[in-house]
Amino acid sequence: MDKHSIPEGARVARDLNEEIDLETVPLRTVNTDPDSAVDSPETSDKRGPGRGVPDLEQLPGRSKKSSLLQCLKPNKAHVYIKMHYFWRLMAAAPFWMFLTQMVRQRGVSPEGIGFIYSFLPVLSLVCGSVLTWVIDYFRVHRASLVVVVIITAFSLSMIYWAPDVGPKVLEGNVTQVSEPKNYNHQNSSSANGDNTVITATSCTSEECPDNEDFIPANFTTPFITNESLSRGEDTPSDNDSPEEGMLSVSQLTKLPGFWYIFALLFIQSAASFLSDTLTDTICCRVLGKDTLLLGRQLLFGSLAWTISALVSGLLVDLYSANLPERDYLPSFIMVILFTLVDVFVLVRMKVNGLEAEKAQPKDFLRVFRSPKNLIFFLTVLIIRAALGIMSLFYALLLEDIANAWDPNFGFLKTLQGIIMVIRAVFGEMIVLSSTNYIIKRVGVTGSLVLVLLNFSVRYILYYTVTNPWYFLPIEFLHGFNYGLFKVAIVYHANNIAPAGSTATILSVLKILSFLAKSLAGATGGFLWATYGGHGTFLATGIFLIFYNIFFVIVSFIISRCCQSANQNIGE
């Protein structure tokens, strides 16, 4: 047949067949399962790049070669988010370490501190959740983060400058500071006539940080002179606890200074809630499809926290060496300077994609109808509660074991410092640098299983410890409990979040964290009172083993049911 006798349409089709290899053309697929791992092109276009909803077991990844090259070659697009994590935690650590001690230094009793923090979580959750949704809706993430960072630094700094709630006695001289009205302070002096006053206390170094003692009205304090100290005389035991001599909650709530401190702590708590959520949201948008590289960004935060905590502690000790009380002025200066640097970094940072998104409440609610997401959120709550047990009762267990092993154990603070370095450097930083490989290999579900298993082993090992130095090798496991867990949940939350609702979904994780702390406090307190310190961690470890088995079984059943549903729809 002559070439010119071929119809025009047939000739075009033939030419296209010859020029295009059909095997190399990606087929257009349709996603019929809202919980499946692959989005249709139409859905991906609406949600933006890298915003698919992957199955907990199916994660996008690149070849080993490209991943190794990514480790060796720095990505300039990620420099500013790394710098933000670094300077943000450099600014946070100097005051976070001493926050409760600073509040107590202002004259608020431990009972009053407990009263404040019994309300702060609830207020912070309500305020933070509402503001997060508003920020998502109006798409002002970066501008809001700049404001929140400044507010956080302001509130922390104002706590340092807050007036004292009541009078106090400083070690070295009798001093009366900011005495409120209706107070009849009883001046006293030592037996030998000098002004050297050291109040007798029966609390431990953890309960009485910095030797700060307060004396309210009508409270007679047994004094110890330098002469009696040199003779090694025992102190009287009547009313010798500073907690007994400080103001009760009913007295504190009548003082304006107490509510001023309460307001500052509330602002700081709500700002921290927003700062954490917005930072992770912006980080996910900066990383785009490389969300698994989140661990490498968090690594700079862990490094900054370690450096800032050690430096601020050293500077505060040196600055306060010849002062009557611990002065946190070096921490105040560090917070201001590092916050200014952080604001400069945020202003220079470029974030793509946030302005193009728009929150859809109906899509946000659809997330909670997925069985996979429900079991995911439940597991996050359980693991957060396990972390709460750690943060609330680990120091008590360490101190009890140290005292039982050697009543005169003089290296408790040194041991705690070594533990902090091991956790940050040899735990978090190493694991954070490799979380992308781990999650690619085992998936989010496998990562959570590893975290639960690690917690179980760690807590059961705590039960066997009788020598405080044996805690050190166990702390090398900390990286999995924090680093892998943090990256896995943020990665999955970012992937399941509908367009424009990333910050809202991440705020759900923060809400679960606050609820878990309350759960850990109630459960841990009951276990400690019933079984003691060793029994608390043993019971928690055993429970996590059974929950881990439950989580694996339920995840397997959900996965099989979803596969069966997909096959039925396909047929």
Image (cartoon, rainbow, N blue to C red):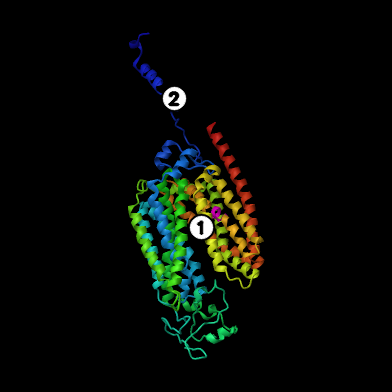
Range of residues picked out in magenta: 477-482
Q: Is residue 480 magenta?
A: yes
Above or below, comparing residue 532 to residue 480 in the picture:
below
Residue at x-position 57% and y-position 58%: 475
- How far across and how far down the image is residue 13, in percent? 38, 19
> Left of 2 or right of it: where is 302?
right
Which disc, if any, is residue 424? Answer: 1
Above or below, comparing residue 470 to residue 188 in the picture:
above
Above or below, comparing residue 517 to residue 297 in the picture:
below
> Left of 480 or right of it: where is 263?
left
Q: Amino acid at mark 1?
A: Ala
Q: Earlier in the sequence, mark 1 or mark 2?
A: 2
Which residue is nearer to you in this view: 75 or 25? 75
Q: Which residue is mark 2?
A: 22
Residue at x-position 43% and y-position 62%: 92
- How far across and how far down the image is residue 552, in percent? 61, 47
Majority secondary structure of magenta residues: helix
